[in-house]
Image: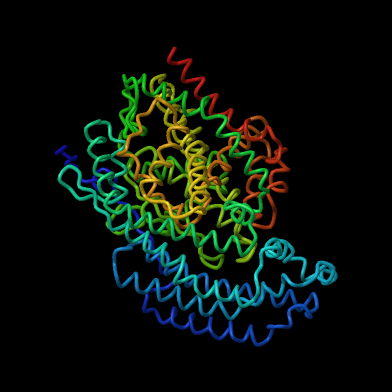
Amino acid sequence: MTAMPSTSPTEELGALPNWDLGDLYGGPLSPDLAADLERGRTLAEAFREQYETRVAQLSGRDLAAAIAEYERLQELLGRIGSYAGLLYAGDMSDPEIGKFYQTIQEQLNTIGTAALFFTLELNRIADEDLAAKFSAAELGRWRPWLRDVRAFRPHQLSDELEKLLHEKYVTGRAAWSRLFDETLAGLRFSIGGQDLTNAEAFDLLSNRDEAVRREAAGAITAELEGAVRTFGLIHNTLAKDKEIEDRYRGYARPISSRNLSNYVEDEVVDALIGAVKAAYPSLSHRYYRLKAKWLGRARLNHWDRNAPLPDDDERIIPWSDARRIVLGSYRRFSPRLAEIGERFFTERWIDAPVRPGKSPGAFAHPTVPSAHPYLLVNYLGRTRDVMTLAHELGHGVHQMLAGAQGHLQADAPLTLAETASVFGEMLTFRSLLAAETDPTRRRIMLARKVEDMINTAVRQIAFCEFELRFHDERRRGEVTPEQIGALWLEIQRESLGDAFIFDAAYAPYWSYVPHFVHAPFYVYAYAFGDCLVNSLYAVYEQASEGFAERYLAMLSAGGTLRHRELLAPFGLDASDPGFWDRGLGVIRGFIDELEAIDA
């Protein structure tokens, strides 16, 4: 067995923060939580008694008042749900926390059913009648929210069917998602004589020692193969569930509902996917051939994808340094951005340590505007972990700024929600690159950034392509785990190129990607954000005067504006056929520079 490092991760990383959820509730048995649940029931019933069957008859002023009441109810329920979800993410292996999380979900679902009528009745108001109601100035505030609610009018079902789908959610999709989370969180990977968590095992795929990477890859394969039938059942069931609902709602393609929820046109997403796929040879294929050469290989094994370069010392970065690097990069761009970001560290809004049962990966959860967001990362001190921190902090700052729009209008669509996070990464990278004068270190930094950008653009579009083909195949019948694995390998070869050896050992790796379960087709939002940020940053470099102010205004708009309106002040248009290729050109430029250094 390969010997594992003897130094304690905590000693190298320094003190890592655990979040304090007390700003939401003091604990699962908190009297405030019990009181808010009861208040939610009372408010929901009172709301139904006052407005059910009468929404269309309300005056513009009264409709505005009703929406404000609805927002207060939804924010209250959102606070409760956020607390339960964050507590569960902190330890998915604790059965008492799992029980609490499920119980809260069921209670919130029941309470929410009482107010379900409201958006259904709003969507039955004729366009001309709603337009007349806007003569009341009070209703103008809610125009963006009404626009977004009514975007789903063509796909709305009868009240009884909508109620049924709402109530069955906790025993349907949510239950299967929970099974996925708890199965994945419960896996232990035997490597170097230790049983490691998901995050710890996958981190070893970036280890300098090939023997460690190979052993880690073998352990991951073995553990995923042991659970692959369960994961296959989960994916098949959720895909069939989606197909049934999509058919009833009249969505043309599996991806259509995601595009609508992102308020982005099908043709824009198709253009993005097409542009990235067309760029595979000039991006990922070209880069990984370079990496194989640097590593002295004819071809790379799948466990070499994230391997450090030969001259890369890949030192461990203590948490205090990560904080300084990220906030310093934010501050150079905008003191206001850094001021907001600082609060996440000083007020314990971040959970950083790796521990058994904790949700793998990273996320920023907005909670509700009357509270604040929380960040979850699994910090192991790698450069990628610093970039992940910059990424999630970008989300958090965005959510703080957008909170002024109120609970119903704060959330930006996923395509734009990834803009602030990727921009935060770019600020951090550019800051580090500008300070680096050593040619070897600069080459390593460029290579790391190219790999991150390939992971964000190429790999996420490949994930989206995997979902598209899997959902299409599922419509013809159940897909076995072996068939899913074959599809996964086919797409990996297409997207990453012939520099890699993708054999059967890599086949079950599709099963650990949570986005496929929790948010089908979410993944293209990362590529959307990466290409958009590349274009945004080019505007910043060319005319930085006033850019930070326009950027903060864009983030502060939350969900009130669509992508065309948000990008117009920067002279950008995502519907322009050349938009995506310009963004991808930034990655090409970095690879060009690497090839020039290597020449």
Q: Point out residue 117 in the picture as x, y percentages from the top left corner.
A: 65, 77
Q: In which quarter of the image is the N terminus?
A: top left
Say which of 566 and 434 sits in front.
566
- 167 is higher (above) or lower (below) than 379: below
Judge by depth and name the residue closer to the eye, 471 or 461. 471
The residue sitting at 30% across, 39% down in the picture is 505
Q: Is residue 146 above or below residue 476?
A: below
Name the colouring of the figure: rainbow
- Left or right of residue 121, residue 381 in this image: left
Residue at the extreme top? 599
Q: Please state if 533 lies on the left or on the right of 304 as rendered.
A: right
Residue situated furthest front in the rendering: 476
Up the image or down, 595 lies above or below 173; here it is: above
The total number of labels drawn is: 0
Q: Is residue 391 left or right of residue 146?
A: left
Q: Where is residue 409 in the image (x, y as percent from the top left)?
A: 64, 62
Q: In which quarter of the image is the C terminus?
A: top left
Considering depth in this image, is 93 or 257 the residue closer to the camera? 257
Query: Which residue is at 64% across, 83% downward?
Result: 47
- Which x, y percent locates residue 90? 35, 61
* Residue 583 falls in image quadrant: top right
Q: Position of residue 457 (x, y in %)?
A: 52, 38
Q: Which residue is drawn at 67% across and 73% down?
A: 120
